[in-house]
Image (tube, rainbow, N blue to C red):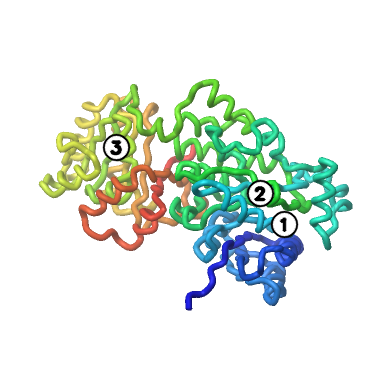
Amino acid sequence: MEAHRPSFSVVIPTYNRERLLRLTLSSLVRQTLPAEDFEVIVVDDGSSDGSERAVAEFADRLHVRYLFQEDRGYRVAAARNLGIDAAVGEYCVFVDSGVMLESGALAAFGRRHASTPGPAAVCGYVFCFNEDNEDAALIEREIDYDDPDSTIRRLRERGEWLDYREEFYTKYGDEFADLPAPWLVYWTCNVSAPTALLRRIGGFDEAFRTWGGEDVDLAYRLHRAGARFVLGRDAAGIHVPHPKSQSENMASTAPNNRYIVEKYDTPITRLVDGTHFWILNDLIRERALPACAEHLSTADPAAGSVLVAAAHARDAALACGGTVARWRARGHQVVLALTTPASDEAVAAARTLGVDAADVCFLGDVPETELRTALGKLLADLPDVTEVYIPHLTRDEDPKRRALGTLVTEGLTARGIGASVSVYRYVLPQPAPAIGADPADLGAERLITRDVAPYALAKASALGAYGPAPTPAAPRLRQQLETFWIDEV
């Protein structure tokens, strides 16, 4: 007989918040949803307090599992991904430790999913969030920790300490799914989404290693995958006061927002950096900006040339097959420069990437002086090159790949076009550092991950030209992501 599958997997990331974690778990014990209809997955990001012990104390009242990852800095994205991977529920509910859910919250999430056509990304309601914890003493006196339902009821009636996003909801209404950017308010302190869809889009981007932005990034990809964003006012919780700094959080979020801009590079996502979220939808409408899918499928009137310089066509297929398809779809010429001898097989493989046979240049496995000359001639024929992609494994990779990257960047500089060109050393699937590797190990470089979901089939086709992909490449393709190195400015 098949085991009962719970409706929800409640994923709670935590780090040294034993008291707050206990409060969240206590609120889950009180849920009106039958206990067999949900599981709880606590993912510990390396705590050194009594968090594991706290979870164990709830084992007789909740279907709870405790997962642990080593403390290697801020890795909440990786923690939530562990939860997604382990989840057996049809939907994942993400709740922060320190959010006490109303007893009917999980049932309310269920009703919202059931009543929404297609996949839903549900924003739960969160009372008592303070930017700088400025009302902590007042809120602490207001909260009845033994009966959070009564606290939420009073706050609703009095209209006090409402959800921080209430200004957004008041402006656009509770049914905001048809906004051009409804994903801006999907903050994972209390939200839900279909587990299968979360897996299909690759989960959270683990390159986010400081506070802020990883949930908005996930929400954007949910939106692109067809999720409908809805508000669940009855899926409510209380944000229990704890020390935090708004100025520090904003300083942390700023580079993460720039990362989102770099990662997707569409007219809409470019507004994420430096635009208040409450007016971003207004700007999109005022400027008549195209939807991201429309923008990426429309030929770029300023289309130029894109250069991929690789040792083998296979390198290009493994590392940036989706990106090549992305540029081709926008009408750009893609030139593939290979340091291998010419062969019909390589030309055929390049064609699976969407590269025309005439745009495949074989530089040959030649000494560095000859390679420099050949690259110089190639770059002289590409005065309008806008993007350059170069294979990159580690900082101590093999000399030939390192020489290729160095010679390309030197050639761009020598011709005076380097300043106007974006150069990426894309990461091959192995033995590249994992997404989210400690920046301290990467010198002056950082990882950029681009979503290539619309071009996943093109990348799969390119990989198919070489037979089964190596095992380390499989998760990259499954996640439909490509990871690049860029120099920190």
For badge 1, the amino acid type reads Leu
Q: Position of residue 131 (x, y in %)?
A: 74, 42
- Cα distance, mark 1 to mark 2? 10 Å
Q: Is residue 149 left or right of residue 348?
A: right
Outermost residue toward the bottom in this view = 1
Task: Give the class, few, some or many, for how many residues have Cα within 10 Å of label 3's Cα (few <14, many ≥20).
Answer: many
Residue at 65%, 47% in the rendered image? 232
**What number is the disc on residue 124?**
2
Q: Is mark 3 on a helix, strand or loop?
A: helix
Of the numbered discs 1 and 3, the one sitting upstream in the chain is: 1
Q: Which of marks 1 and 3 is in front?
A: 1
Q: Is mark 1 on a helix, strand or loop?
A: strand
For badge 2, the amino acid type reads Gly
Task: Give the class, few, some or many, for how many residues have Cα within 10 Å of label 1's Cα (few <14, many ≥20).
Answer: many
Q: Where is residue 395 in the image (x, y as percent from the top left)?
A: 39, 51
Q: What element carries label 2?
A: strand
- Cα distance, mark 1 to mark 3? 55 Å
For badge 3, the amino acid type reads Val
Q: Nearer the viewer, mark 2 or mark 3?
A: 2
Q: Mark 3 points at which residue?
A: 408
Of the numbered discs 2 and 3, the one sitting upstream in the chain is: 2
Q: Position of residue 20 (x, y in %)?
A: 74, 60
Q: Name the residue under label 1.
A: 101
Query: Closer to the camera, 354 or 402?
Result: 354
Pointers 1 and 2 in contact (CB under 8 A)?
Answer: yes
Pointers 2 and 3 in contact (CB under 8 A)?
Answer: no
Task: Give the class, few, some or many, for how many residues have Cα within 10 Å of label 2's Cα (few <14, many ≥20).
Answer: many
